[in-house]
Image (spheres, rainbow, N blue to C red):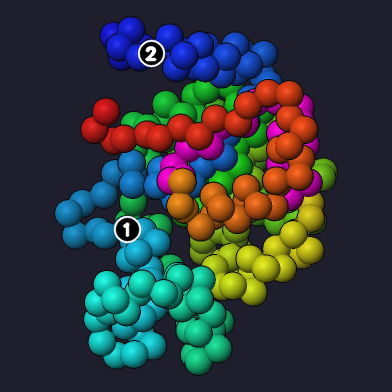
Amino acid sequence: ETKKSLSSSMRMKLDNIGNNLAYGKASVMVGAGFTKNAEMDETVSIKDWTGLAEVFFEKLYSKKPSDKDLAFQTPMRLASLIATSFGRQELDRMIYKALPDERITPGKAHKLLLKLNWKDIFTTNYDRLLEDTASKIYKFYNVVTNKETLLYTESPRIIKLHGSFPDIHPFIMTEEDYRTYPQKYPEFVNTIRQALIERVLCLIGFSGNDPNFLAWIGWLRDVMKNLSHPIYLITYNKDF
């Protein structure tokens, strides 16, 4: 019924994704927004980018920020100031506290996503919801959390691009992390470039102004100019 309500253009795009999935020629990149589909009780609060910026600002200046305070501050800039002022260990502790990995469990959307025939699942998320989902639905994925094992691990894989709870550091967050990422982690960047060339890539859990989305689009811009097939940015609404 949902599919019937979509435009013919959208149905055609979904059919293209489905056809590529059937032949194992589709990969997906999962962003922070998808974590909000996790199961949690009313006491749990998952910080989005704005929420992280507020937490960092309050730590730095001992007051709650106004909209004006955050108007010219990015979460990455504030994270950089935290690392400089209090140390990288304190920044990691604050990130872990803001994203309570141990108090959330996979939701229905996670299970539906991992049941599909993805060649690889890339994620910029630190949480372990995708790995936990694979275990719960008894579907095998190799989990890659560092560049050293990437080239020797076969698909299907869950590839953690920006670190992983509880202790796979660094959690990519500061301006310097983003600036130097392509040089420090060329294996990850090149693997996604290869995925773009060889198969359909879907992005889910990102908004158009998500810092991770903007960073990865920037790093991959050159190869994207020569693509013969599209990238799909899927907006998923939990109440849809």
Q: Position of residue 8 (x, y in %)?
A: 43, 9
Whether residue 131 appears in magenta in the rendering, the answer is no
- Foreground: 131 or 64? 64
Side of 24 relative to 67 (left or right): right
**What's under tag 1, amino acid-wise?**
Ile
Say what secondary structure mark 1 lies in: loop
Placement of 118 over or under 178, stated as above or below? above
Q: Quadrant of the C terminus?
A: top left
Magenta residues span 189-207
Q: Marks 1 and 2, how far apart in space?
A: 33 Å
Res. 141 in view: no
At label 1, counting other C-alpha atoms closer than 10 Å, the crowd grade (few under 14, some 14-19, many 20 or more) is: some
Q: Earlier in the sequence, mark 1 or mark 2?
A: 2
Name the residue carrying label 1: 46
In this view, the mark in front (1 or 2):
2
Say what secondary structure mark 2 lies in: loop
Q: Residue at x 30, y 12 (%)?
A: 5
Name the residue carrying label 2: 7
Q: Quadrant of the N terminus?
A: top left
Q: Position of residue 116 (x, y in %)?
A: 52, 22
At label 2, counting other C-alpha atoms closer than 10 Å, the crowd grade (few under 14, some 14-19, many 20 or more) is: few
Res. 208 in view: yes
Side of 79 relative to 168 (left or right): left
**What's under tag 2, amino acid-wise?**
Ser
Side of 27 relative to 36 (left or right): right
